[in-house]
Structures are given as C-alpha cells and as structure tokens.
Image (spheres, helix red, strand yellow):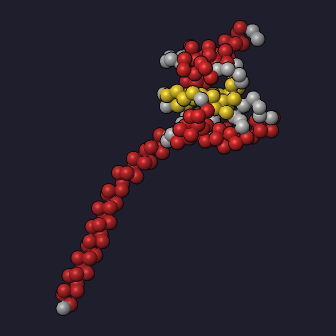
Amino acid sequence: MRKEDKSAIIETIATTIKEYDNFYLTDIATLNAAKTTNLRRECSKQDIKLLVVKNTLLQKALDTLEGDYSELAPALKGNTAIMFSNVANAPAKLIAKYVKEGVPSLKAAYVQESFYVGKENLKALENIKSKNELIGDVIAALQSPAKNVISALQSGGNTIHGVLETLSKR
C-alpha cells in the first residue's frame, strides 16, 4: 500500500472517530461471509457504522486526535473491527446478541469519554444508559410527585364532597 493511501485511510478513520461519541473495538475474524453480512445489516439498522481496520493505521489515527487513547493500545492486536455509534450501549447490545456464537468479541471500547478494555466489561457497557434514556428517567422522576399531588387532591375532593353530601342529607 502506498504512503498516500495509508495517509488517506488514517485521515478517514480519524474523521470518523470525531463524528461519533462512542466506538467499540471488536474481533470479527472468525465470522464467515454470511454471518458478517448479517452483522453488517444489524449494524446498519441500528445506526452503527462497522469498519474493519489495520491496527497500525488505527493507532496512527488515534495519535492524530486530541486526547490520550493509549489505554486502547493493548487491544490493538489481531484482527480489529470498529463499531461507531452515538448511542452508548447499542454496539454492546449487538455484540452480546452475537457473542453466543463466539464472535464478535469485545476487545475495548471508548464510551462517554471512558475506556473499557477487555470482554469482561460487556455487561457494564450493555447497562449504560443513553442520553435520551437518562432524560426520560429525569422527566419521569420529576412528573411523579406532581402526579401524586394532583391525584391526592382529586381523590380528597371527592371524599370531602361525599362527606358533605351525606351530612346535608341527614
């Protein structure tokens, strides 16, 4: 591969990393063609970009970015595919779905400005809530006390009305 081609690939990888908030490093080497095609379809449905890269080119792309990505260096061995997503836990859920077949295996992840190295972190990554899920939880928590007060006032009003009506009839 020519130096110009390598430079273009490094630039493409770096640009893609900047576009997405989260990325997962996986090993999909043992997938056959049919399973790889199915994985790519699943990724496409969930707005996950799958990119197979050479470790040296990925390392050079990470070196060009701001920030320290050195914690990912131990994971840059063997075959590497990157799953890019703006939803923090989407790739983890997809990997967990396929991991029963042995692949893809999680090598490392950069999620919400934190590093997760090793496949033992897959469960933790699956349970990370996305920004929209957290906003929904906050809204639900804020609505709950207001709903309780309104419900108490409405049921209390009916009770008082019922008592007054009963007393007036006597």
Residue 64 quadrant: top right
Q: Quadrant of the N terminus?
A: top right
Task: Give the number of marks.
Answer: 0
Residue occupying image coordinates x 36% and y 54%: 143
Q: Residue furthest bottom?
A: 170
Residue occupying image coordinates x 20% and y 82%: 164
Residue 90 quadrant: top right
Q: Quadrant of the C terminus?
A: bottom left
Residue occupying image coordinates x 75% and y 29%: 29
Q: Residue furthest front?
A: 120
- Left or right: 152 as drawn, with respect to 122: left
Relative to 128, residue 148 above or below: below
Is residue 41 visible to the viewer in this orientation of the structure?
A: no
Residue 82 drawn at (x, y percent): 65, 28
Relative to 27, residue 58 above or below: above
Relative to 35, residue 17 above or below: above
Residue 6 drawn at (x, y percent): 70, 13
Residue 117 quadrant: top right
Q: Residue furthest right?
A: 33
- Left or right: 136 as drawn, with respect to 78: left
Residue occupying image coordinates x 61% and y 20%: 74
Is residue 160 visible to the viewer in this orientation of the structure?
A: yes
Residue 154 drawn at (x, y percent): 30, 69
- Relative depth, front residue between 167 and 4: 167
Relative to 153, residue 70 above or below: above
